[in-house]
Image (cartoon, grey):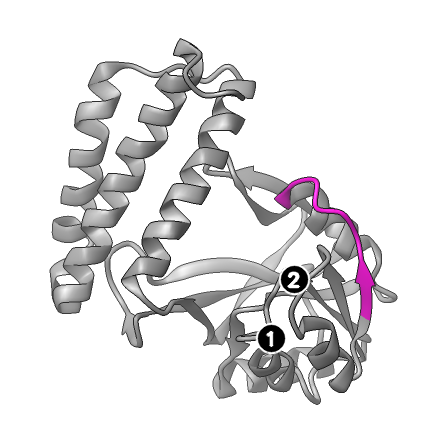
Amino acid sequence: MPKISAVIMTLNEERDIGRCLKSLEGICDEIVVVDSFSTDRTEEICLQYGARFMKHPFEGYIEQRAYSISQAAYDHVLVMDADEELSRELRDSILAVRENWTHDGYYFNRLASYCGQWIRHCHWYPDRKLRLFDRRKAAVRMVKYLHDEMVLIPGANSAKLKGDLLHYFIYTVDEQIHSINMYTGRQARNMFKMGKRYSYLMMIFSPMYKFIRNYIFYLGFLDGYFGYLICRNAAYSTFLKYAKLKALYKGSIVP
């Protein structure tokens, strides 16, 4: 039976980290928390749950994720975000895998909560993630010019586990607006550094396509008012990303 290291990145996560850590009890042989110098009670809470807590400067999502995985004592790793929680069914699935590890990596669906409502459409679900894997058979890559994502190396095999990874994503609409403004700025800067170009057609039609795709074809309307809001904000986020990229090329924003 392989030993498993749970790996979590944090920055001021006192609101969510306790719930995340509690869901890991009995699942992992160690919990490694790599923190970007939190100023709240994150460290205190992590230590209460017996986590190995270390501080490391944040240089980017990919770099921080790769560093945190490298700090694990064991090669079999479960990657979590601080605002995530293992559902009971997913806990049972992971415990079964521990008894009979047969693949290089295991995928499971992530189910997100928006303002207290679980969102099952809008292109948000099923949000399949590789989070349990042999680190010798996996790597980190960038997605959407910003976030990190785990992928298996060529030749590695995988399976899908039953159960959801519960993601307590957004608590208020104001919180999402703040998040959109912050992340689109980072996306635009990464796109600028990578030489990604913009066009007025992209600024006009990409947001329209995003809304129609998520609200109509991915059935966002079935999530009611919050589904509509999510799809509208996704379209706005797409527009803002290109608008900020344009501003960078025009020199009105310092890279």
Q: Which of pointers 1 and 2 lies earlier in the amino acid sequence?
A: 2
| Residue at x 69% of width, y 83% of height | 27
| Residue at x 58% of width, y 46% of height | 148
Range of the magenta residues? 53-61
According to the picture, the residue beneath numbered tag 2 turns out to be 10
Of residues 151 and 196, the one drawn nearer to the viewer in this rendering:
196
Q: Position of residue 121 (x, y in %)?
A: 24, 62
Type of amino acid under label 2? Thr
Q: Is residue 176 left or right of residue 206?
A: right
- Asked if labels 2 and 1 touch by Cβ distance under 8 angstroms, the answer is yes
Q: Is residue 220 left or right of residue 91?
A: left
Whether 180 is drawn above or below 244: the answer is below
Type of amino acid under label 1? Ile
Count of marks, rendered view: 2
Res 88 visible:
yes
Of residues 43 and 231, the one drawn nearer to the viewer in this rendering:
43
Of residues 255 and 78, the one drawn nearer to the viewer in this rendering:
255
Give the CA distance from mark 1 to mark 2.
8 Å
According to the picture, the residue beneath numbered tag 1 turns out to be 17
Image quadrant in which the C terminus is located: top right
